[in-house]
Image: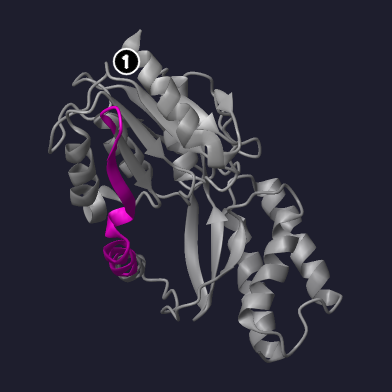
């Protein structure tokens, strides 16, 4: 990459920090990147992936927000145009293509010994894209005596899909799950379970176990957090990564996009979230041992 191109990307990244959910932190992150730029840290000739890593390290040096990134995208993507409707359509189309390639984010569905259902979720795509896949997984879980939801490889996703999954695990009366405060509008959106689901409802009575790892992030963390706070599931595994800030994405180069947290999750019960701390499981064990411990727990719950 040439110096002029690098400078343009860095300048645009700093400009977008005006949208950061905490203005003072955004300003300090921008100053850190500007200082690194002036010191020659982003030298001519570096590749986009290297530039993304360097700038991300500098952005996150302020408060460790793992959602705040200059993210490398291996596939070339169209640049953000500034036309919100067109950009949203392009992002939706790309998400739909990705979701189609990974079965709507449902990596694996099984019936384990002891009549336990197992669903592994890798990505929580928006319901408008992936509701049929998630509904199919939940349908296959119907009739089981207990359910394991494996989020150990979940990289995150849509809070609407979190609500869709949770809607299968409670009764028809709406349950308040989470709130998201948006800085740009100064408004808070509430997320609730739905009174109806497109397939069978697993319901509120049968036991649920959730598996987590140090990789579990963002929307995956919210799903674990909501179910734990509401007492609907027992968590097994490792403390999660700690990212509770939803982002806006701006493609500034075919292989680089800026992800800026412009909102934050707020628990309607505690007022807190998992940013920087992660979600702590009820039973802390190495991720590799989490499934065995969860199965043991569910079988014990059935027998008691």
Q: Would you say residue 110 sits in the magenta stretch? A: yes
Q: Is residue 137 above or below residue 1?
A: above
Quick one: quadrant of the N terminus? bottom right
Residue at point 36% right, 25% down? Answer: 208
Residue occupying the far top of the picture: 304
The reply to whether residue 228 is in sight is yes
The reply to whether residue 267 is in sight is no
Quick one: quadrant of the C terminus? top left
| Nearer to us in this view, 140 or 19 | 140
Q: In this view, does 211 lie above or below 25?
A: above
Q: How many marks?
A: 1
Can you give x and y, in whole percent of width and height, for residue 298 in the image?
A: 38, 22
* Residue range highlighted in magenta: 92-116
Q: Quadrant of residue 38?
A: bottom right
Can you give x and y, in whole percent of width and height, for residue 100 in the image?
A: 26, 64
Residue occupying the far right of the picture: 39
Q: In this view, does 150 lie to the left or right of 114?
A: right
| Nearer to us in this view, 216 or 41 | 216
Q: Would you say residue 281 sits in the magenta stretch? A: no
Q: Is residue 287 above or below residue 261?
A: above
Q: How crowded is mark 1: few (under 14 residues within 10 Å), some or many (20 or more)?
A: few
Can you give x and y, in whole percent of width and height, for residue 233 in the image?
A: 41, 23
Residue at point 48% right, 52% down? Answer: 155
Q: Name the residue under label 1.
A: 302
Residue at point 83% right, 79% down? Answer: 40
Q: Is residue 276 left or right of residue 268?
A: right
| Nearer to us in this view, 120 or 290 | 290
Can you give x and y, in whole percent of width and height, for residue 14 in the image?
A: 66, 66
The secondary structure type at the circle numbered 1 is helix
């Amino acid at each position: 990459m040439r110096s002029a191109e690098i400078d343009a990307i860095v300048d645009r990244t700093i400009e977008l920090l005006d949208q950061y959910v905490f203005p003072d932190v955004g300003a300090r992150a921008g100053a850190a990147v500007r200082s690194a730029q002036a010191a020659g840290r982003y030298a001519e000739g570096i590749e986009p992936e290297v530039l993304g890593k360097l700038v991300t390290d500098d952005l996150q040096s302020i408060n460790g927000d793992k959602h705040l990134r200059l993210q490398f995208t291996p596939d070339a993507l169209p640049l953000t145009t500034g036309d919100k409707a067109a950009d949203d359509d392009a992002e939706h189309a790309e998400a739909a293509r990705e979701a189609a390639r990974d079965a709507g984010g449902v990596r694996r569905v099984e019936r384990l010994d002891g009549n336990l259902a197992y669903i592994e979720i890798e990505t929580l795509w928006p319901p408008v894209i992936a509701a049929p896949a998630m509904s199919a997984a939940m349908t296959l879980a119907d009739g089981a005596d207990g359910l394991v939801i494996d989020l150990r490889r979940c990289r995150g996703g849509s809070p609407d899909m979190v609500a869709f999954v949770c809607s299968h695990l409670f009764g028809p009366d709406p349950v308040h799950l989470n709130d998201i405060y948006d800085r740009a509008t100064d408004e808070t959106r509430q997320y609730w379970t739905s009174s109806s689901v497109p397939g069978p409802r697993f319901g509120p009575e049968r036991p649920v176990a959730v598996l987590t790892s140090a990789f579990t992030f963002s929307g995956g963390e919210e799903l674990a957090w909501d179910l734990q706070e509401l007492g609907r599931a027992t968590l097994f595994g490792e403390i999660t990564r700690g990212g509770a800030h939803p982002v806006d994405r701006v493609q500034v180069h075919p292989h680089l996009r800026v992800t800026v947290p412009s909102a934050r999750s707020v628990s309607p019960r505690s007022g807190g979230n998992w940013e920087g701390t992660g979600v702590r499981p009820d039973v802390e064990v190495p991720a590799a041992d989490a499934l065995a411990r969860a199965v043991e727990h569910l079988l014990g719950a059935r027998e008691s």
